Image (tube, rainbow, N blue to C red):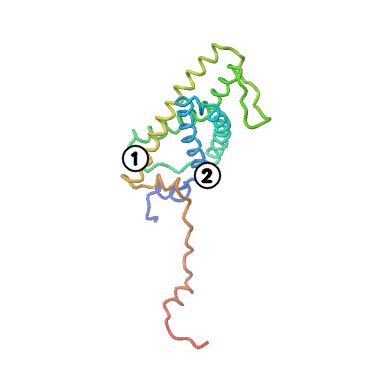
Amino acid sequence: MSAFPPSTQALSTSAPRHFNLTARVLHWSMALLIVTMLFVGVGMVASMSLRPSLVSLHRPIGIAILLLVIVRGINRFRHPPPPLPADLPAVQVLAAKASHWLLYALMFAMPLIGWSMMSAGGYPVTMFKGFALPPIAPHNATVYAGLRGAHTWLALLLFATVLMHLAAALYHAWVRRDDVFPSMARGEPAAIAPASPAGEANALDDTPRIV
């Protein structure tokens, strides 16, 4: 008879305890890009002198986030994340899942809305010198104003969601001290091969040998 209950045994043998390498690289890369984007966005509003340089940085970072979130979504579909702790309250489980889906939605929607906004305003979305993305919205001042307002409010929502995500990560790392934060911070530990009976016998036999 197994020493573990059936559900625990199935979880330990089938469900991963850590995110795969691709998910971890994408997570931390996108976290850096999103934090950078938030600071760039604040700088664009606060400083008119730096605005042209920040706008030229804002556009390619936004498209990079759009591409990476697509890759991340595909990877998440192919490699399901590790389960949350079994003793986590249902409210926290619901909040964790809802906040993750909200983050994915915002990371996908924000670049598209920004791209559409620039297209509606008649501004080229330049990635680098000599290459600009095609417009995806008609040149219309009313559409531009609506998209600009949506972009601003969603940016504030993204900022709040990122802060909640960070607070939750620190809660799991410092208060609960469970496997949630380590599952994204590092990979699966290397498995230690069990010692063979012959090896155990040799380890117990300390009789001097003549070589």
- Dot 1, crowdedness within 10 Å: few (<14), some or many (≥20)? few
Q: Which residue is mark 2?
A: 25
Residue positioned most to the bottom = 210
At x 50% / y 30%, what residue is drawn?
107
Q: Secondary structure at mark 1?
A: loop
Quarter in which the N terminus is drawn:
bottom left
How far is disc 2 from disc 1 in space, using C-alphas?
26 Å
Question: Which label is found at residue 102?
Answer: none
Along the viewing direction, whichever of 102 and 86 lies nearer the viewer:
102
203 shown above or below 119: below
Please name the amino acid that badge 1 sits on: Leu
Location of residue 42 (image quadrant): top left
- Horizontal placement of 113 versus 154: left or right? right
Above or below 39: residue 171 = below
Pick out the residue farthest to the right.
130
Report which residue position mark 1 lands on.
88
**Is there a contact, CB below 8 Å, between mark 2 and mark 1?**
no
Secondary-structure class at tag 2: helix
Label 2 environment density (alpha carbons within 10 Å; few <14, some 14–19, many ≥20): some
Q: For the point 46% across and 22% down, which residue is it?
A: 152
Residue drawn where x is 46% and y is 32% of the image = 39
Report the mark closest to the observer, 2 or 1.
2
Q: Name the spot of residue 46 as percent of width and height, x first.
A: 44, 26
Q: Residue 170 location in percent, x, y?
A: 36, 42
Report x, y in % for residue 113.
Answer: 54, 22
Rendering coords of residue 90 (x, y %): 34, 35
Which one is nearer the viewer's eye here, 113 or 119? 119
Name, please, the residue furthest toward the front: 49
> Relative to the observer, which residue lies in front, 161 or 100?
161
For marks 2 and 1 on the same chain, the one whose residue lies earlier in the sequence:
2
Q: What residue type is disc 2 on?
A: Val
What is the count of numbered marks?
A: 2
